[in-house]
Amino acid sequence: MAEGALVGVAKGITEKASNLLAQEIVLLWGVKDEIERLGDTVLTISAVIEDAEEEQHHNNQVRVWLKRLNDALHEADDLLDEISTEALRREVMTRNKRAKEVRIFFSKSNQLVYGLKMGHKVKAMRERLDAIKNDKGFHLDERTQARNYRVRETHSFVRTEEVIGRENDKREIIRILLDTNVEESVLILPIVGLGGLGKTALAQLVFNVKEIQNHFEQKLWVCVSNDFELKVIVKKILECTKNMKLEDLEINTLINDLKKEIDGKRYLLVLDDVWNEDPQKWLSLKDLLMGGARGSRILVTTRIKKVAEITKTVQPYMLKGLDKEKSWCLFKRFAFANAQDLQNPYIKEIGMEIIAKCKGVPLAIRTLGSVLYFKNPEKEWLSFKNDELSKVAQKENDILLSLKLSYDHLPSYLKQCFAYCCLFPKDYKIHKPTLIKMWMAQGFIRSSNQNQCLEDIGHEYFMDLLWRSFFQEVEEDGSGNILKFKMHDLMHDLAKSVATSDNATFYSKEEDIQEKTRHISFDRTFLSSSGIPISLYKASRIRTFVLLSQSQHPRLGKSTYNAIVSRFKFIRLLDLHDMGIKIIQSSIGKLRHLRYLDLSSNSIRMLPNSITRLHNLQTLRLSRCPIKELPKDIKKLVNLKYLEIDECRRLTHMPRGLGQLTKLRTLSQFVVAKNSCLPFRRNGGLKELYGLNELRGTLQIRRLRHGKDALLESKDANMREKQHLQGLTLRWIKEEVDESNVCYDEESLEALYPHSNLQELHLLRYGGVKIPSGISSLSTLVKFSLNNCNKCQHLPPLDQFHSLKSLSLEWMNDLEYILENDDNCGFFDSSFLPSLEQLEIKYCPNLKGWWQQQRDSVEEVDNHSLPSFRRLSNLVIWHCLKLTSMPLFPYLKKLKLGMCSLKPLEQTLRMKLTNMATLESLTSIATSTSSSSTIADSSFIPLSKLNHMTIVNMEETLPKELMCNLISLQDLSCGPLPLSQHLIALRRLIINGSNEFDIINNGDEMEWHGLQRLRYLKFYNIPNLATLPVGIQHLTSLQRFKIYDCPNLLAIPEWIGNLTSLQTLKIRSCPILLERCKKEAGEDWPKIAHIPHLDI
């Protein structure tokens, strides 16, 4: 168990004991008294655990005692979990067995035998804990309040030459502190970063700058640490102002003296090492500090983002690690005893590899440098890097003790959550939703309120650790939800150091598994080369078996699988994903404690029904498995919350009884069976969804049918009650919809509309002519797509979706217009699709325009009057030959056009072109245009923000003068499109020609001369290309050049030698050229032999 987290295990035991005592079955078994005594014993012990965990660092007796207690408490937890599981199993049996079977099952003799057996076990466990309690032989205090953490003292002085690599940070903080253009009289700036980054050193550096010293009347430095008591802090500030130690005065006297000292004066106050997260405590102090003169400043240093949010009046300054060169400069000061070694490039190379492990943390760099100072660089540094570096963090107290201060401040429940993360390798992108489910499986997340979702509590745990800088580098999805994150390497070292021997991570053969190990993770690379170590099977109390990394695909043999199932009977989390498993043995049902089972990405076609004996199971992951059906008795998985079956494309139906799993929060897809609407059906129909109102995330309903019967079934799904659902995909079967069934599809869709909180809606093969009006209730819709809805002719009024960010229309054969209005007033309003960022329109052969009414007059008006997308950054129009009228799209960053008209693009490029400056001045205008800019802006250049553009398979081309707008274009793939010397940002160019396109005549030498940043050039499918354009010789930055499918290209020109940066030349399907470029023998070989990478 993680250091400092044992009290959490004790709490879990007392909660389980309390829950068992409330069940009648326990009384029937005759074990109620023993369970109650056991709970009391654990409760008594838990009162002294915190003191023991603190004392163990300097008392070996206490450390040994805690180890015994740790083992006993975990075994007690397993025992109570076994009894709870049995009680749950019998409860499930009563729901599903016939009366006669229930009577036999609950016969008196049956109950007495089990009760007697468990009674002996509970009594023995209680006596074991009593013995441990009484054997401690030393005094421990009961803790009724928070422990006293080690206090860290800091001061304001630092030698400037000792702080390396923080000049830019110092300059920026001074700028903020001296900025007079701020609203607040007293500005508060927090500096945030993990332990060892140098927050205090940076604050000291700023504090002692002469410019700062001269600017402020009062300069005050207070080390706050964990003792955030108003009286203490006020006294410390006063001692700074008076430069003397004060007596113990009353709080009112202190406050009055403080106000006399700072009110009306311009002061700088540094509050260093702040841990307080209580807003009220902060406000009590802040109110006393607001009397300073205008221009007063408070600088706060903290590891915790939440502290920064509470205290800030401006955005916190997020301190980052040093870069490579600055790290090296710092490292040199501490590591080299002999200055001559600095000149040795070999030693520098080893040193750079060593400091790379420090991730730019100055404390770590200084500590490692100090260790290496006493080692011979030529003889010992390399072995240190290879053999000792991974262990140094555990040996060098300065690093871990600094970070451990953060850990010590964590509550017990967060300590075990953080320590558990050591199972992931360093630099691993941890999937946050998965981690929360793993925490749940281990019982780390508990709630006193049954109505509170454990997943929500887990999210709070995660955010708390993130706020405190234990986690970093978060990645979000399109909706702003955190998906992945990382741990700093030093934080990972800390997690391993506090996790003790309970956790083992297998990334090398040097790792070992102890008998008491409970959590283990394997790297696939290690597992594929070394297999599962024999020592694993000695650890019979394993609770976690997890596989990480996708670099290898090891296979799990039947014997190994059987060994895991037979030996790890207390396992709670089993991860066997992507192990090449084809058959799951029925013995899986013996893992009664299992909460989390990952079988995803295996070749499993069928699950044994015995899996439904896993009544504790919360998470079942089967994604990307070719299973045809789920277990028929799935309703017995009464605790199942997360059923992940996305990309299980062979599923034919859902089992009856699925709807009884009312705790389900994730159901990634629901497959409607054939004839599911018939009364004699064996499989579950849409009615199974009726009571699943806790569903969250996204749900896909597949194989929906057309017609009257399908309508009646759709009404049974009760979708409007699923208020937590974020995304819904409705996919109908592929069949022709006759006219008589069109109205039924429309009514089915109306019945399947979920709660108004829905953010994503995707319809595939919907057979209606129009989208029912009920869609207007989905006012928070962010993504909307229609695919293969070939009969659909009328879309809903899109202007009602003010939050819509993404719209996709594909394979809409009958769609002619996107909007239908009596006039154009609505289109020209500033609220026209104000949030839309991505628009895709593909394979809509009859789509003529965005609007229907008065479209002719709209097309004739000046471009200034056309509606425009204000936030659209990504546009795709593909195979829509009739589409000629569109709103304008001046703020695009990505554009892809193919088999469509260029008229909308030309209209957009001509916006306000008549009022622009000369072409030469275009390149000097800033390319960043705010999304709130208006067309009337005098400096506006349409499509000046465009970065990527693809235009292929077109029958027309753009006028050359319009290309000059594209001053930010970096990536261009085009067919018949003129080049322009104003494409100054272009880095990648692919020219996909045609028989009609003559690249020589469409681009003179000057146009090529302007492409000075071009790095990549490709000619593809240009049959009439006989010679390479001479202007290419000016592309001195060109690194990669490819020529494909140019059968008439005659030769490589002499000037190819002018391309001094060229690294790669590839030639494909150019028979004449290939013959001339043959190695050593071809006529053109001498011209290209100097190019490093030739692929011919």
Image (cartoon, helix red, strand yellow):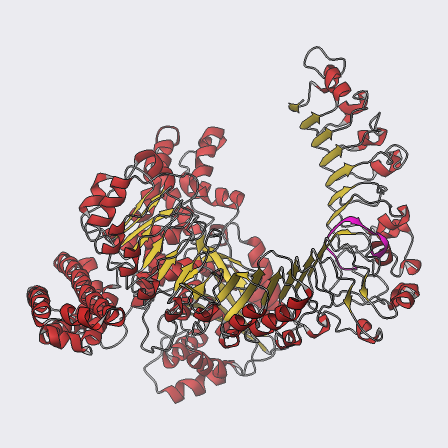
Q: Say whether residue 1010 is left or right of residue 687.
A: right
Q: Looking at the image, is 625 positioned above or below residue 379?
A: below
Q: Position of residue 1041 (x, y in %)?
A: 72, 30
- 123 and 269: which one is in front? 123
To which quarter of the image does residue 784 belong? bottom right
Is residue 298 visible to us here?
Answer: no
Residue located farthest toward the top when viewing the structure as drawn: 1081
Count of labels shown? 0
Indicate the quadrant containing the C terminus: top left, top right, bottom left or bottom right.
Answer: top right
Q: Say whether residue 709 is left or right of residue 540.
A: right
Would residue 902 be counted in the magenta stretch?
yes
Q: Looking at the image, is 573 positioned above or below residue 1076?
A: below
To which quarter of the image does residue 1045 belong? top right
Q: Which residues are magenta?
A: 890-904
To which quarter of the image does residue 372 belong? top left
- 394 and 650: which one is in front? 650
- 377 and 599: which one is in front? 599
Q: Say whether residue 814 is left or right of residue 5.
A: right
